[in-house]
Image: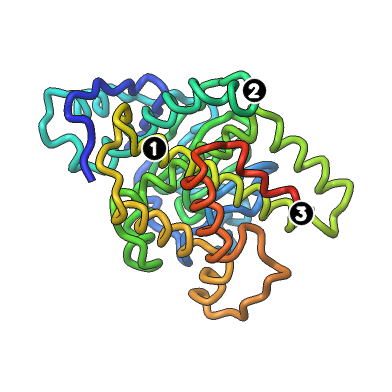
Amino acid sequence: MDFDKDAELDTSQIDDLRGSGPSGGGGMGGLPGGGKTIGGGVVGLIIFIVLGLLGANGNIPGLQDGGTSSGDNRALAEKCAKSNPDRFREADCRQAVTFNDLRAYWSTNLFPTLGAQYKEPRFVLFEQAVKPACGQATSAVGPFYCPGDQKIYIDLGFYDELASRFGAPGEFAQAYVIAHEFGHHIQTIDGTEAQVRRLQQRNPAKENQYSIAMELQADCYAGVWTKAASGPDGLVGTIGQQEINEALEAAAAVGDDRIQEKSGGRVNPETWTHGSAAQRQKWFDTGFQSGNPKACNTFQSL
């Protein structure tokens, strides 16, 4: 895929924390994951299957405070400037242009379609470990969105894992990930996230079902944005069948059944919190085919 080579990227909403934490943190064991509540509200991309991320004292090596720090994005702004002809060869600049395009789409379309007032999220790039408003997390959690500070958190090393371990390579697989997390931001500002948490408290027996519906809706929103981005006015250009296939494979790769298979465990639908590979692909495609956020009512059968 290619991008608008003349795009002026706005990095003012991006907090680049990479390199700001103490060294020596090292990687954590286990597969990347996300989705289990950590410290009260992290909404992640895939199932959290890494045990014992925190030590007995709750400290994480290399911890970066993403909840309060705005980071220093001057180097990123320079790297991703139009004057750099090679900028889109780098994952961080590709994520920046995708984030810009998502902001442009939702700021224009949120109120007309879902009736909510748009509010900007922030996008945090970190390494090893970070401390969002929702609680401490490591890179092993995978990409996630924190409703408490309305920030999207990504360690770009996740994309190596997505390609090598989960078999979902490609630049648009990476675009799908941030579009999914942006979908969680939409759910926060339109009230869906808070409503789901209340429903889960009232009906614990359906807690996982509500969680799955919320994750599938975020997948659907990612598909809706993809439809818009494939038009002539998007910053993310040339979205063809190859790119759609990359997104669909990424959606399938982080299905609960696929994660359970990869971890060597038994596939148990009763423990799912994000949906199966087939469900995630179905709802991404629903969003893409419709191009309408109103089509993303994944709660209708609950």
Q: Is residue 180 left or right of residue 172?
A: right
Q: Of helix, strand and loop, which one carries label 3? A: loop
For marks 1 and 2, give the one nearer the viewer: 2
Q: Which numbered circle lies on residue 290?
A: none
| Colour scheme in use | rainbow
Residue plotted at (40% across, 54% down) = 247
Given residues 150 and 205, the one toward you in this image is 205
Given residues 51 and 205, the one toward you in this image is 205
> Callout 2 environment at 10 Å: few (<14), some (14 to 19), or many (20+)?
some
Q: Mark 2 or mark 1, which is nearer the start of the sequence?
A: 2
Q: Position of residue 87 (x, y in %)?
A: 18, 35
Given residues 277 and 193, the one toward you in this image is 277
Q: Of helix, strand and loop, which one carries label 1? A: strand
Residue matched to label 3? 301
Q: Which numbered circle lies on residue 116?
A: 2
For marks 2 and 3, give the one nearer the viewer: 3
Residue plotted at (74% across, 51% down) = 210
Q: Position of residue 244 (x, y in %)?
A: 36, 53
Instruction: Please say if the residues under marks 2 and 3 sit with CB atoms less than 8 Å apart.
Output: no
Residue matched to label 1? 125
Place residue 89 in its image quadrant.
top left
Q: Mark 3 or mark 2, which is nearer the start of the sequence?
A: 2
Q: Is residue 8 left or right of residue 69?
A: left
Q: Mark 1 or mark 3, which is nearer the start of the sequence?
A: 1
> Callout 3 environment at 10 Å: few (<14), some (14 to 19), or many (20+)?
few
Q: CA distance from mark 3 to mark 1?
A: 36 Å
The type of residue carrying mark 3 is Ser
The type of residue carrying mark 1 is Leu
Given residues 68 and 157, the one toward you in this image is 157
